[in-house]
Image (cartoon, rainbow, N blue to C red):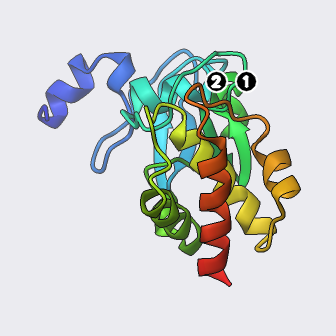
Amino acid sequence: MLPSSLWDRFAPPAVRILLPNRIPIPMESPMIPLNINGKPYQADVAPDTPLLWVLRDTLHLTGTKYGCGQALCGACTVHVDGVPTRACSVPASSVAGRKVTTIEAVDQQRIGKAVQEAWRKLDVVQCGYCQSGQIMSAVALLATNRRPTDADIDSAMAGNLCRCATYQRIRAAIHEAAKTLA
């Protein structure tokens, strides 16, 4: 970490996130206040920058994956105020001041921990690329429906694609997590 005086003078814009004991550098565009995984950040990015790139490139939270860039595959799913949201199509400015939860913090909740344990127990993952989005969607489902039917699961998970076709294991893991939460 650079000393404060050097930080203020030489830190490139891509890394100018407010850290403890740091003063923001005046910029043409305002810093975007974000609440990611319960921690406050100020992101020095253009307002229309997709949340996915702020998470991955600016904040270095790389658990959320890029899949299609068009909100069609679900690999980039995060929670915004508890609602599953495709981070690739949401401008960072639209989540300013809202609570964003990523896969890195989902296990801090009882439901998230139960889903991740069920995923491990039933060996759901094959290649694993889509799994962070799958888990985030499963957690959102169980947050609103603790006893989902197969049809409920299929409906809630419909926006998440798995090129390895682990859908049966995903469904079984959601049922397993629901049993644990009962």
- Under tag 2, what secondary structure? helix
Q: The residue under label 1 is which amino acid type? A: Ala
| Residue at image coords 45%, 37% | 126
- How many marks the image carries: the answer is 2
Q: Can residue 98 be seen by looking at this rendering?
A: no
Side of 16 relative to 48 (left or right): left
Residue 40 in percent (x, y) is at 48, 51
Of 36 and 28, which appears nearest the observer? 36
| Residue at image coords 72%, 16% | 70
Which residue is labeled 2 in the image?
Answer: 88
Residue 132 in percent (x, y) is at 52, 42
Of 61 and 141, which appears nearest the observer? 141
Q: Which mark is residue 71?
A: 1
Q: Earlier in the sequence, mark 2 or mark 1?
A: 1
Residue 151 in percent (x, y) is at 88, 54
| Residue at image coords 81%, 66% | 148
Determine contact: label 2, label 1, CB under 8 Å: yes
Q: Can residue 180 be seen by looking at this rendering?
A: yes
Q: If the image is split into quadrants, where does the N terminus sit?
A: top left
Residue 68 in percent (x, y) is at 63, 16
Q: Which mark is residue 108?
A: none
- Under tag 1, what secondary structure? loop
Pointer 2 local density, CA inside 10 Å: few below 14, some 14–19, many at least 20: many
Q: If the image is split into quadrants, where does the C terminus sit?
A: bottom right
| Residue at image coords 50%, 27% | 54
3D distance between C-alphas at marks 2 and 1: 6 Å
Of 17 and 70, which appears nearest the observer? 70
Q: The residue under label 2 is which amino acid type? A: Cys
Foreground mark, 2 or 1?
Answer: 1
